[in-house]
Amino acid sequence: MSQDLPAIASGNHNGHVTSAAVEEWRQISSLESIVPPAATANALLSSITLTVNAAGTILEIDSESASGLGYTPADLVGTLLLKLVHVRDQARLVDGLTKLLHQSAQPLSSQFCLVGQSGECLETQMMGRSLPGGNGMTIVRLECRLLQAQAPLPQAPAQPDDSSQQLAATLQQQIDQQHLVNTISQHIRASLDLNTILKRTVEEVRLLLKTDRVLIYRFEPDWSGVIMVESVTAPWESILGNRLHDPCFTAAQIEAYRQGRIHQVADIYNSQLTSCYVELLAALQVRANLAVPIAAEQTLWGLLIVHHCQSTRSWETATINLLKQLATQVAIAVQQAELHQQVQQLNTQLEVQVKERTKQLQQALDFEALVRHITEKMRDSLDESQILQAVAEELGQVMQTQHCIVELYDSLHTRATVAYEYATETTLCQGLTHTIVDLPELYQPLLHQQPLQFVDHQLDWNPQLVNVTRLACPIFDDQGILGNLWLVRSRDDCFSEFEVTLVQQVADQCAIAIRQARLYQTAQGQVDKLEKLVALKDEFLTSMTHELRTPLSSISLAIQTLEKVLEPKEWAAKEEQIISRTLQILQDACQKEIRLINNLLTLSYVDSGEPLTSTLIDVKVWLPQMVEFFRSRMGDRQQTIALEMAEPLPSLHTDRSYLERILHELLNNAYQYTPAHQTITISAFTSNNYLNISICNSGSEIAPEALVQIFEKFYRIPHSDLWEYSGAGLGLTVAQKLAERIGANIQVTSRDQETTFTLLFPVDN
C-alpha cells in the first residue's frame, strides 16, 4: 500500500476530496478505461462503471452511469461509494474492498444493491480489480452489471447514516494498519540494520494505536530479557535497556509463547494475574498490557509488547491481528539480520584468509622486487662495496632477520672475512676473519656450494649470537666460489624452503655483481694506465712543439734578414728571380710549420681549460677590419671577396683572440679551397636570437660522407685537382674547439657547388 494513501483518503469521509486529487486521477485514468455501453435511461442501462480510491471515495464515473442513477458526474465525484450502496450491503462491500486492496491478485465479484437518487434499488453483479494509480497509490475499478431494477425499498437511505460513517472509519483503520505492515516490510527489504527497523516499528505502532509505550523485549539464554527498543510518550518513564527477570515466567509459558500465545490484559488489577507479575507491571507504570511473541525458525526470540499506562484498555481483534502481522515481519527482520551476521562472520574469516594469502603473495613480491633491485643496482653501479652493503641491508629487512652479513673468501679459499654487515641493533662482527681449516664441518659444505641451516652452532662471531637459527648460502658462479650470505633469526623462527631458495637467488646475483665489479676494477686500472700514457704523450707533444717553434722562429728571422741584405744588390734578372723564388719558398714553408705548431699548441691549451679574457666587440667595426687584413694576404689567386652586413648587428662580449683565430681559420679554409675566379662571401646577420657570421665559398662542394668527419683531428678532405693546398687537418678542429670554448657553434652545409661555414653566437633579445 502506498505511503501516499492516507493523504489522499483522509479528510472528508462525508464524500469530498480535493479538486487537485480528482484532476490527477483523471489524467491517470486516461491510460486505461472501461467504456460502458451507452445508455440514456434505466431501461437501456446495462452496466455502471466507476473508479474509487483506497478510502472508498469516487474518483471517476462516466456521465451515462451517473445519469442511470439519477445523478451527474459532478454530484458523485469526491463522495463516498457507500452513498450509492444499500445499507444491507455496505458492510459486505467494505470487507470485499479491503480484501481486494490487500490481496490484489483476487478480484472482487459479488452482488450488491445500488440505490439511485429516487430510491430505486438496482441489483448488480459487481466486478472489481485493483490498479496502480499516480504517486504510488492503489485504485479500484468497478463494473456493476445490471441484473434487475426494483421498486424503492422503504428502508433505503438516500445519504449515508452513522453506520455508514462507522464502516468508512473501519475501512480507513484497516487501510492504515495494512499500510503500516507494508511500510515495515519495505524497511526490512531495504535495510539490514535490525535496530533501525525495530525502532521504526515501535514508533509507528505507538502512534497508530495512540498508546503510551511500545517496546520489543529480547530473551536471553536464561530466559531473562532486555528492553531492546522502545517508544514512549511523556510523562511515562523510559525503560529502554532494562534487564528484566520475571520469576513467574515458567517453561510452560515459554512453550505457549513459542506456539503463538497472545497475552492480553485490559486491567492488571482486574485480571487473573499472579501477584509477582502484577507487581512487575505496576513497577513499570503499566495498566493494560498486550504481548505478541516474536518467533524465528521455531525459536522464541522475544516479545512485541504494548503498554497502556494512563488507563485500562480493551484490545480489539484488529489491533491483535496487526501486532501478529508486525511480529511476523520482525521475525523476518531477525532472521535476515542473523543471516547477515553469519555472512559477515564468514566474510571476516574469508578476509583473514585473504590477508594471510595476501601476506604470502606480498612476501613473494617483495622477494622478487629485491632480486630485481639488486639486478638494477648491478646495472647502475659497478661499486662492489656499495652493491653488497645494499644487499645485506635490504635482504635483512625483507627477511626480517636480526643479522645479515656477506663474507668473502681470499683467493686461495683459506680465510673468510666479514666484508658487509646489517644488524638490527649494532654492528657485531664487521671485518672479522675466520680460518677455514678451524671450522671444517661448517665450511666444507659451503665450499661444495651447498646451503646450510642450523641452530646454535658454536661460532665465535659474537657472544650475543647464540641460541639462534642461522642460514648460510654460498656465493658462487661457473668460475668458482666467492663467499657466503649469512642470515640470523631467533631459535624458533626457521627459514622455509621458499626463503632458502630466495636467499640462494640473491647469492647468485651477488656473484654476478662481484665478478662485474672486479672486472670493472681491472679495466679501470688499465684505463688509468692508458690515461697516464696519453698524458705523457700530450706532455711530450707540447714539449716538442715548443722545441720546434724555437728554431722555426730563428729561421723566419734569418729569412727576413737575408731579404734585407740582398735587397740593395744589383743582380742579373735570372739570379734575382732565383733568389726571390727561393726566399718565397722558405717563407711559405716556415709559415706553414709555424701554423701547424700553433694549432697543436692551441689544442693543448683549449683541452687544459685556459682562462678566457672577455672584451666587448663591435661587430660592425671589427668584421670589416678582419676581412681587409685577410684580403691583403690573399696574393694573386684571382678570388673575389664580398662582405655583407645586415642592420642592426649586436655587439659581442667574448675573448677577442679566440674569435679572431676562429675567423682566421675559417677564412683560410675558404681561401685554400676556392678555385680562381670564384667568390668568398662573408655575411653577418641575426636570426632566432643568434648572431650568424657565415663564410661561403663558391666553386667547391664537400661530399656528405666527408661533412660528418670534417672537424675531426688530422682529417683531410680527399685531394681534388682544384685544390692546391693541403694541411695537417687541424685548422677546423681548432676552430670548433675554440668556438665551444667561447659558447658558440659552427655549422657547415655544402650543396650546389657552394660550401658555407656558419659561426653562431647566442644573443639576448
Image: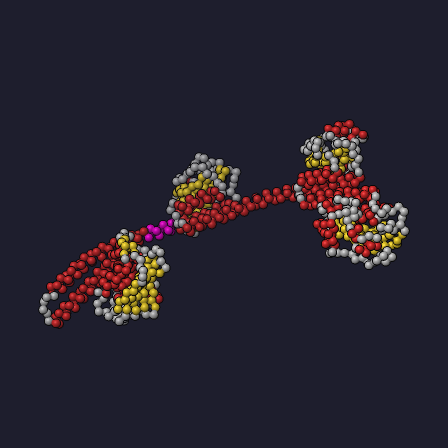
Q: How many marks?
A: 0
Residue 206 visible in the displayed image? yes
Task: Give the side of residue 270 with respect to residue 432, left or right.
Answer: right
| Colour mapping | secondary structure
Image coordinates for residue 137, horizontal then vertical, percent: 73, 49
Image point (44%, 50%), residue name: 376
State the residue at coordinates (81%, 30%). 270
Q: Main secondary structure of the magenta part?
A: helix
Location of residue 132 in the rendering, given as x and y in whole percent from the top left corner:
73, 51
Which of 54/757 is in front?
54
Of residues 334 and 762, the one nearer the viewer is 762
From the viewer's side, name the closer residue of 349 and 185.
185
Q: Which residues are magenta?
A: 517-527
522 inside magenta stretch: yes
Q: Does the magenta segment cover residue 169?
A: no
Q: In the picture shown, does residue 31 fall above or below 11?
A: below
Q: x and y percent of residue 474 in the render?
A: 45, 46
| Left or right of 691 on screen, residue 76 | right
| On-image quarter of the C terminus | bottom left
Relative to 79, 583 lies left or right: left
Q: Position of residue 236 (x, y in %)?
A: 71, 31
Which residue is at a point 44% across and 43% down the rendered structure image?
A: 392
**Residue at the extreme left of the image, as rendered:** 570
User: Visible in this render: residue 221?
Assistant: no
Q: Against 674, is 189 above or below? A: above
Q: Is residue 110 above or below residue 621?
A: above
- Nearest the camera: 154 or 229? 154
Q: Residue at x 24, y 70 (%)?
A: 638
